[in-house]
Every structure is written in structure tokens, then in C-alpha cells.
Image: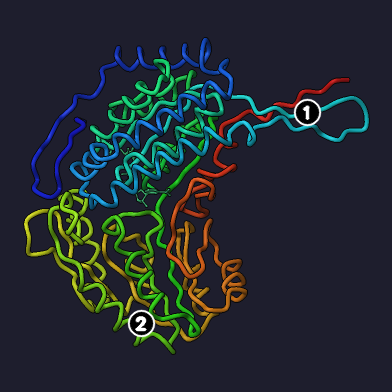
């Protein structure tokens, strides 16, 4: 399959790239393996950190053109694209500064002799990454693993090839040796070949459950470790003692950021009866304040979805939800505007038998549920195949923490929608995947915890 940039705002094809042939792929694998064996694993933390910090500086210097590429390829509002560039640079800096401490040798208390555990790099890693945050997703995978001494190869989503190349170029400009960071324009069949290749020692995927299941199964056949960052349908619980205005403001930003195309977007709004009507009214009012426009224009408030196909898929989900008994409170259709624009939408009356009840809506579609009390809110939040994030709104922080402990997900935010920061672990449970990225945890996934015992 070809790698192609298409601007979802106007449907214009910007650039097309051919997939690599077998010889090109073999040359890249060879180069990555040689780089690991003869160069990168032998570098000191300080040497690797210099390169990553330089990449962070270059990202900041080139923030505007890098951000424009995101907006052109997948439609993100330019202010949010700039935010993504800044966050990606922060991740590079964070691991440049902290990797050595995270991976410091650990001396074990032992009855006789000496025992220590060292964190050794394992080799060439392979990442399969999605389009929704074209730099942030790869920074999350590349920065900790490069600092750990591994080298990385990335198959990015086929809709963001210019961002994929821009990141690779950035690493080269920063001084990374050839093979330390490699972009691969490859087909799904070639993804399987790369996973099978004995030079690949670990595999990470961020994307859908379907892709995760295929890639994890292939890696499993090869006894290779994986991390999986998959979809989510995060609950946004509003208790009767919540600050209503804050909850509504966060509901809007949690659902509408990145045009709703975030794994940790707030997707299921679960509000206790006492506040339900007032919350819904204010939420609806606020969701009317979005107007479509060119995402490169700073004044635009509603961006298109990432592609015409993504819009068709979302509209199909809404139609199935309605056929299954859901009621459209607002929206529900494409915008009367050129480009892949979806109306901000709220659906209610979603029964447990409705397909929408267990699906992820990747766009500006909010599912609204009213519940009797706190216990019912937690039960509904947990009645999902996903377990990525979630939010609880209450003015009683201890109550919020108690609920957070009962919610079966990898992350819970109190009085805020989900967010990401280099120092905070990111990942899920159940069908949202396994393993963690970011923070100290993210650098431990692909290292060999080697015991060295002195008799
Ligand atoms: P996707 O279709 O799974 O694509 C993600 C990546 O996997 C792309 O590079 C894609 O390549 C590749 N891929 C897809 N099917 C594959 C297969 N059978 N074999 C090998 N590679 C395959 O996901 P998406 O729809 O673009 O992204 C949205 C999904 O990602 C949502 O479910 C979202 O929640 C999830 N996500 C999760 C996180 C997280 O951290 N948990 C973060 C962001 C997104 P092509 O582009 O060439 O198809």
C-alpha cells in the first residue's frame, strides 16, 4: 500500500511515497543491526543524551513547519499541532536528562558475596504507530528506547508519511548515526516479515485493538516481547458534589481535543441523577460553540477528522447506535461544509445491548448516561472492554481517590480530562493493551534486567 498525504480539509493529495522493496527493507534492517552492535549500545548515556537533547532543540526551532505538516496531513488545529511539537520535544529532553538514573545498576542485599542488576539494551526494536499524534507517538517510543541503548525502527501510519520522514530527518540532523532511528514505509505483509526477523528483539504498537491483536500474535509466535497501547472508551464520571461549570468545561475539552481522535479522550459521560439535566443542558450549549474552518487558521475551532474514511466510519457508528435505540440530542451528521467535518454530537438512551455501548467513538461524539449514584457510576464505567483512562469529578478529593481505585483502567484523573506529560506513566489494561510508555516505567519495557553475581 502506498503512503499518501491527503489534506482532510480539502481532499487534496499532497504527496505519495512508494513502499520499500525487499532489498531496501533488508538494507535498513542490516544498517539498524550494525548500528546497534558497533555503535549505539556502546555509547555512554551522556553521548546519547547530547543527540536527543539536540533533537529536542531542533524540534523547538522548527516548531512552525513541523506543526504545519501535522495539520496538513491529519487536520489537527494548528495550535494543538504546536502543542504536540512542544510535548514531543519535552519527551526527548526528559529521557535525555533522566535515563541514566532510571537505569542505574541496583545492588541487591544478599547473604553472601555481591549481586547487582544492570539494565542492558536488547537490540533493534520495531514500533508500529498511529496518525493521531504523528510526532508524540513516535517520541514516546523512540526517546526512552534510544536512551536505553536500543535502536528503533518505525512503521508509521500510511496517512502521515511527511511527518514520519520529518522525525527521521530530525534525528539525523541531531547527530544520530545511520540506523539508530529508521523510518520504514512498508506494507502489512512486510510488518509481519520484520516481526519475524531475528534481528528484531521487541515490538511496540499503538493503534486499534484489531492491529494490536495481529501484531501481538505475530510477535508471540516469535516469542518476542510486546507493548500494546490500544483504544479506549474513557468514562467521565460527574458526582453530585462536582463543580458543574468546571466539569462541563473539561467535558468539552476532553471530548473535542484533536477533534475527538484521542485514545484517552473522554467518551462516556456518566452523570449522577442529581446533576444530569443541568450538566446535559450546559454541555449541549458549550458543544454548539464549534465552527468548522481551515485548521491552519488560528481562529478555527472545529477541525476536520483525519480522513474522509474516518468520517464515514464514525457516521456509520452513529447510525448503528440510533438504529439500536439511541437518541440524538444534538448533531449526528456530517457538517454542511467541504472537508471531513463531523458535527459535535451527543447521544443518550444507550442500552447495554446497543452496539455503541461497548464501542470506541473516535471523533466528536459523546455518549451520555445518567445513573442513580456513585456505585452505579463505577459499575457502568467498568462495564467496558476497554481500560485505558477515565475521569472523576467531585469536590471531595478523598472520595475521588476512592473511586479512582475502583475504576479498572490504567489511568484516572480527578477533576480533569486525561492528559499526558513525560513524567506520567501512560497505558491501559483489558483491551486497551499492556505495558507502559513515558515516565520511569516506559524505559524499563525493553531492557534486559541482567543479574551479575559475584560468588
Ligand atoms: P490502526 O488502524 O490500528 O493503525 C495504527 C498503526 O497500525 C498504523 O501504522 C497502521 O498502518 C498499522 N496497522 C493497522 N493494521 C495493521 C495490521 N493488520 N498489521 C500491521 N500493521 C497494521 O489505528 P488507527 O485507527 O489509525 O488509530 C486509532 C486507534 O489507535 C484508536 O483505537 C485509538 O484509541 C488507538 N490509539 C491508542 C493510543 C494509546 O496510547 N493507547 C494512542 C493513540 C491511538 P496503516 O496506517 O498503514 O494502516
Count of numbered circles in the view: 2
The residue shown at (63%, 28%) is 448
For residue 249, which quarter of the picture?
Answer: bottom left
Please say if the residues under marks 1 and 2 sit with CB atoms less than 8 Å apart: no
Which residue does the image show at 42% across and 43% down from the upper left? 213
Left or right: 171, with 318 as reference point: right
Residue 241 to residue 324: above or below: below
Crowd class of label 1 (few under 14; some 14 to 19; many from 20; radius 10 Å): some
Q: Nearer the viewer, residue 216 or 248?
A: 248
Task: State the image coordinates of residue 357 (x, y, percent, origin top left).
Answer: 36, 68
How much space separates mark 1 and mark 2, taking CA atoms?
56 Å
* Residue 281 can be seen in this image: yes
Name, please, the residue furthest toward the right. 112
Of labels 1 and 2, earlier in sequence is: 1
Identified at 29% across, 63% down, the residue is: 256
Q: Residue under circle 2?
A: 279
Say which residue label 1 marks.
Answer: 116
Q: Secondary structure at mark 1?
A: strand
Mark 2 Cα within 10 Å, few/some/many (few <14, many 20+)?
Answer: many
Tell me if residue 411 comes above or below residue 421 in the rendering. below
Q: Position of residue 125 (x, y in %)?
A: 47, 27
Q: Work out whether 149 lies above or below 381.
A: above
Quarter of the displayed picture in which ligand 1 can be seen: top left
Q: Is 16 drawn above or below residue 87 in the view shown?
A: above
Q: Residue at x 32, y 34 (%)?
A: 61
Q: Quadrant where the N terminus lies?
A: top left
Secondary structure under tag 2 reads helix
Amino acid at each position: 500500500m502506498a503512503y499518501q498525504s491527503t489534506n482532510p480539509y480539502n481532499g487534496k493529495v499532497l504527496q505519495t511515497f512508494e513502499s520499500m522493496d525487499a532489498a531496501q527493507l533488508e538494507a535498513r534492517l542490516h544498517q539498524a543491526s550494525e548500528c546497534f552492535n558497533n555503535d549505539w549500545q556502546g555509547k555512554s548515556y551522556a553521548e546519547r543524551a547530547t543527540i536527543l537533547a539536540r533533537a529536542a532543540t531542533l524540534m523547538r526551532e522548527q516548531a512552525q513547519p513541523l506543526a504545519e505538516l501535522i495539520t496538513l496531513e491529519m487536520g489537527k488545529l494548528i495550535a494543538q499541532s504546536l502543542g504536540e511539537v512542544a510535548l514531543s520535544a519535552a519527551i526527548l529532553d526528559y529521557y535525555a536528562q533522566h535515563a541514566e538514573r532510571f537505569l542505574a545498576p541496583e545492588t541487591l542485599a544478599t547473604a553472601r558475596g555481591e549481586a547487582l542488576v544492570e539494565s542492558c539494551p536488547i537490540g533493534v526494536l520495531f514500533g508500529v504507530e498511529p496518525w493521531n499524534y504523528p510526532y508524540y507517538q513516535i517520541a514516546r517510543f523512540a526517546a526512552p528506547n534510544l536512551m536505553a541503548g536500543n535502536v528503533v525502527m518505525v512503521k508509521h501510519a500510511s496517512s502521515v508519511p511527511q511527518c514520519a520522514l520529518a522525525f527521521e530527518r530530525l534525528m539525523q540532523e541531531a547527530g544520530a548515526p545511520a540506523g539508530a532511528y529508521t523510518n520504514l514505509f512498508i506494507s502489512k505483509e512486510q510488518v509481519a516479515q520484520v516481526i519475524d526477523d531475528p534481528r528484531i528483539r521487541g515490538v511496540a504498537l499503538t493503534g486499534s485493538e484489531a492491529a494490536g491483536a495481529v501484531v501481538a500474535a505475530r510477535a508471540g509466535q516469535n516469542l518476542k516481547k510486546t507493548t500494546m497501547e490500544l483504544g479506549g472508551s474513557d468514562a467521565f464520571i460527574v458526582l453530585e458534589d462536582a463543580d458543574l461549570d468546571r466539569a462541563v468545561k473539561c467535558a468539552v475539552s476532553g471530548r473535542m481535543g484533536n477533534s475527538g481522535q484521542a485514545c484517552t479522550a473522554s467518551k462516556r459521560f456518566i452523570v449522577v441523577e442529581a446533576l444530569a439535566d443541568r450538566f446535559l443542558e450546559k454541555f449541549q450549549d458549550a458543544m454548539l460553540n464549534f465552527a468548522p474552518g481551515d485548521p491552519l487558521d488560528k481562529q478555527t475551532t472545529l477541525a476536520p477528522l483525519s480522513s474522509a474514511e474516518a468520517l464515514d466510519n464514525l457516521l456509520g457508528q452513529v447510525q448503528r447506535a440510533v438504529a439500536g435505540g439511541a437518541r440524538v440530542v444534538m448533531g449526528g451528521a456530517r457538517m454542511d461544509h467541504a472537508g471531513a467535518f463531523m458535527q459535535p454530537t451527543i447521544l443518550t438512551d444507550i442500552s447495554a445491548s446497543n452496539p455503541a455501548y461497548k464501542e470506541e467513538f473516535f471523533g466528536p461524539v459523546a455518549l451520555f448516561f445518567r445513573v442513580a449514584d456513585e456505585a452505579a457510576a463505577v459499575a457502568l464505567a467498568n462495564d467496558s472492554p476497554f481500560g485505558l483512562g477515565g475521569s472523576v469529578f467531585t469536590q471531595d478529593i478523598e472520595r475521588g481517590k476512592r473511586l479512582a481505585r475502583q475504576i479498572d483502567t490504567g489511568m484516572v484523573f480527578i477533576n480533569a480530562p486525561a492528559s499526558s506529560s513525560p513524567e506520567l506513566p501512560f497505558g491501559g489494561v483489558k483491551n486497551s493493551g499492556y505495558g507502559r510508555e513515558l515516565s520511569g516505567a516506559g524505559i524499563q519495557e525493553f531492557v534486559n534486567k541482567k543479574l551479575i553475581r559475584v560468588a
